[in-house]
Image (spheres, helix red, strand yellow):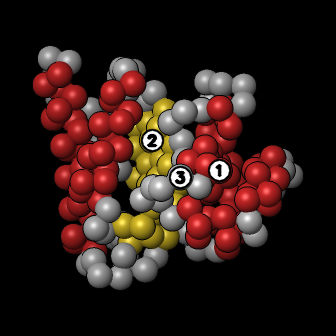
Amino acid sequence: MQDPLIPGKFYHVYSRTVGEEILFRNENNYAYFLRRYSDFCSNHFATFCYCLLPNHFHFLIQVRESTNEAAALSAFSNFLNSYSKSYNKVFDRHGGLFQRKFKRKQIDSEDYLTAVIKYIHQNPQNHGLIQDFKKWKYSSYGTILSKSKTQLETNWVLDWFGGLEEFEKNHLLEEDNQIWIQELEG
């Protein structure tokens, strides 16, 4: 099995649309995408953060110990297929929506884990979609700050950074971001 999703491991999972296709044409698409993700993936993955952008998405997940590699891959694949089928039907479209295979990178160090969380949240600003990533509506950053009820592992994320204040402060530090940008975008 190539590129497995191993139980207990953390992964940065992401995918992009084919060509110039827009993944989210309206507000409802963003919400529906997250509902489909929850429906197909919440039993298989703990989710720590995410960001949805017009033509791609990012998630930081940990494969649950109770899941096996085949079930994890199938869950994520079924999630993307479900969204694609609905999208194609609503927008009278045919063919694949996502590039051939969703990408995933196993998180292999604490520094990399911290960098991935920051990278995911800062992605809209890095792509020039917004001047301040903290204002992007389609990311987990605001949800984590609000401490509202969610399926995200917000307490874990806040603890990882040493609390809410450190979470916010750490997201603004630039010096270590550039170290990981090439790795994360590769």
Q: CA distance from mark 2 to mark 1?
A: 20 Å
Q: Earlier in the sequence, mark 2 or mark 3?
A: 2
Nearest to the observer: residue 14 or residue 26: 26
Residue 27 x/y as whole percent: 39, 24
Q: Earlier in the sequence, mark 2 or mark 1?
A: 2
For marks 1 and 3, give the one nearer the viewer: 3
For marks 2 and 1, give the one nearer the viewer: 1
Kind of residue sitting beneath label 3: Ser
> Quadrant where the N terminus lies?
bottom left
Quadrant of residue 73 in the image? bottom left
Q: Secondary structure at mark 3?
A: loop
Residue 74 x/y as whole percent: 21, 62
Kind of residue sitting beneath label 1: Leu
Nearest to the observer: residue 53 or residue 151: 151
* Residue occupying the point 54% across, 33% down: 137
Q: Few, some or many C-alpha atoms within 10 Å of disc 2 (few <14, some 14-19, many ≥20)?
A: some
Write down the residue under mark 2.
57
Residue 152 x/y as whole percent: 47, 59
Figure check: 99 above or below 179: above
Q: Residue furthest top?
A: 92
* Residue occupying the point 38% across, 33% down: 30
Q: Which mark is residue 18?
A: none
Residue 159 x/y as whole percent: 67, 71
Quadrant of residue 61 in the image? bottom left
Write down the residue under mark 1.
145
* Residue occupying the point 27% across, 32% down: 97
Q: Which mark is residue 148?
A: 3
